[in-house]
Amino acid sequence: METTSYKGTNKMIIGIVFGVFTFWLFAQAMVNVVPAVQKDLGISLGTLNIAISLTALFSGLFIVAAGGLADKIGRKKMTYIGLILSVIGSLCLVLAQGSLLLITGRVIQGLSAACIMPATIALMKAYFEGAERQRALSYWSIGSWGGSGVASFAGGAIATYLGWKWIFIFSIIFSLLSMWLIKDTPESKGESTGAFKFDYTGLVIFIITMVALNVFITYGSDLGWTSLITIVLAVVTIIGAIVFFKVEKSKDIVLIDFSLFKNKPYSGATFSNFLLNAIAGTLVVANTYVQVGRGFNAFQSGMLSLGYLVAVLAMIRVGEKILQKTGAKSPMVWGALIATVGVAIMGLTFLPDLAYTVIVFIGFALFGLGLGIYATPSTDTSVSNAPSNKVGEAAGIYKMASSLGGAFGVAISATVYSSISAAGSLEMAATAGIIVNVIFGVLSILSIIFMVPRDAGKTGTQKEPKKQKTPNPVQPESSH
């Protein structure tokens, strides 16, 4: 537990936001620059798609372990490790001449994200309280949800006018700035007893299961859904999941503490977060379709999602204010609903060019509007319901839901799109890909309705873990 009476500062918030933003520069920007990277490095589209998905996969695989580790060895230290890995991973991409450094860099970037995401959320929880914590998490969400939009837009512009490798030079600059800005933040750890222990068995079983599942979803259609390899992957996934659950229930030191899910608000926030991130498949389907089916270039397709970016950034603080007035449930439901409607209208591919372009722009804007309203109430619900010595681990599971949701959403949407487009109509392929994402959205809304209680997140109803008794200065009425 913290023995310091340190109060979080704006400098610390900006440093953390820059750290979170580096992830999006290398995660999201890559989606927009596929043709340029392919041409420059002379590699196949299949190899490039693997390289793109590796970052989300590795961050998803290691984020819970890194979150639990941050609670034990220090959350600031873990953030620094992540930022150093970010610089190394980005350097690999800047120096890449072929697929080797590209793939190495993407793996290192995934590990970097796994270290940065849960550790920075835990730092926010450690050094901010109540409404101030909700404000800090809003800015974290701006870096995270808004970062994907900024990076998508900036990535297209940088690639078009400077060359795609410049994206990763900017990523290095942001990482170094982040290190400098958080250098004065004191270390924060969870309470621990005795020597450091880690659940290596759980981690190995978890990785095997997740890799099998990811390969099954991504390559099932290429290998054939009834082929021996695909069936083996499905069996490994199912057995792996059962074994992992049994092993984790029987041990004291575990990778994923399933007792966290006994808390319904935490479960509701985490499940809906997984499903709402799965809608990210829309970005891949819509971007690919407008470029291949409607003749847009990378910069123009980036411009189409500008409404998404503006709406996310504008609505995150609004989501925070609604959370403080009504509690978390109502903005989470409305956010998920608006995002789902935005995605649904992008499926109207039968419309002529101008009308469809307008619809996609509006769809992206609604998608951003919904995610912006949802972001802070959801993150705050997950963090405020976690025990204080397990915030890193709980944040790790919550962010793993984001990464894996995004990875599976993209994989399933891309599989549906490519399977149908290979058989003929691009319009049908895009519509089917979008329908998959609408289903994710509906499931997300249902998980919030049934699992998040009405009073979750209301100021005054949250059970904050007790801190040291230092008199708090009177907080000004949130004027931010």
Image (tube, rainbow, N blue to C red):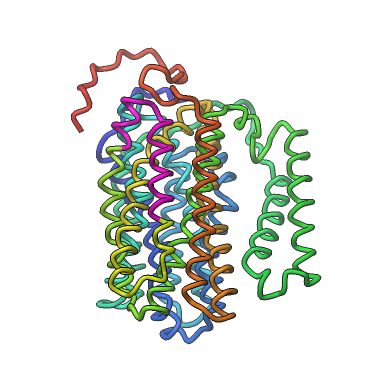
Position of residue 159 relative to residue 477, above or below, is below
Q: Quadrant of residue 175?
A: bottom left
Looking at the image, can residue 281 be seen?
A: yes
Which quadrant: the C terminus? Answer: top left
Q: Which residues are magenta?
A: 319-342
Q: From the viewer's perspective, is residue 273 above or below residue 289?
A: above
Q: Nearer the viewer, residue 287 or 140?
A: 287
Q: Is 71 located above or below residue 402 in the figure?
A: above
Main SS class of the magenta portion in the image:
helix
Residue 71 visible in the picture: no
What is the x, y in percent for residue 472? 29, 16
Q: Position of residue 63 (x, y in %)?
A: 55, 48
Residue at x 51%, y 33% (from the top left corner) = 449
Which sits in the foreground, 370 or 214?
Answer: 370
Q: Is residue 464 left or right of residue 172?
A: right
| Nearest to the observer: residue 78 or residue 460 | 460
Q: How many marks?
A: 0
Picture coordinates of residue 327, whole percent (x, y): 38, 26
Q: Is residue 69 magenta?
A: no
Q: Residue at x 64, y 63 (%)?
A: 217
Q: Residue 46 appears at what percent x and percent y?
A: 56, 78
Residue at screen point 57% across, 80% down: 422
Nearer to us in this view, 53 or 377: 377
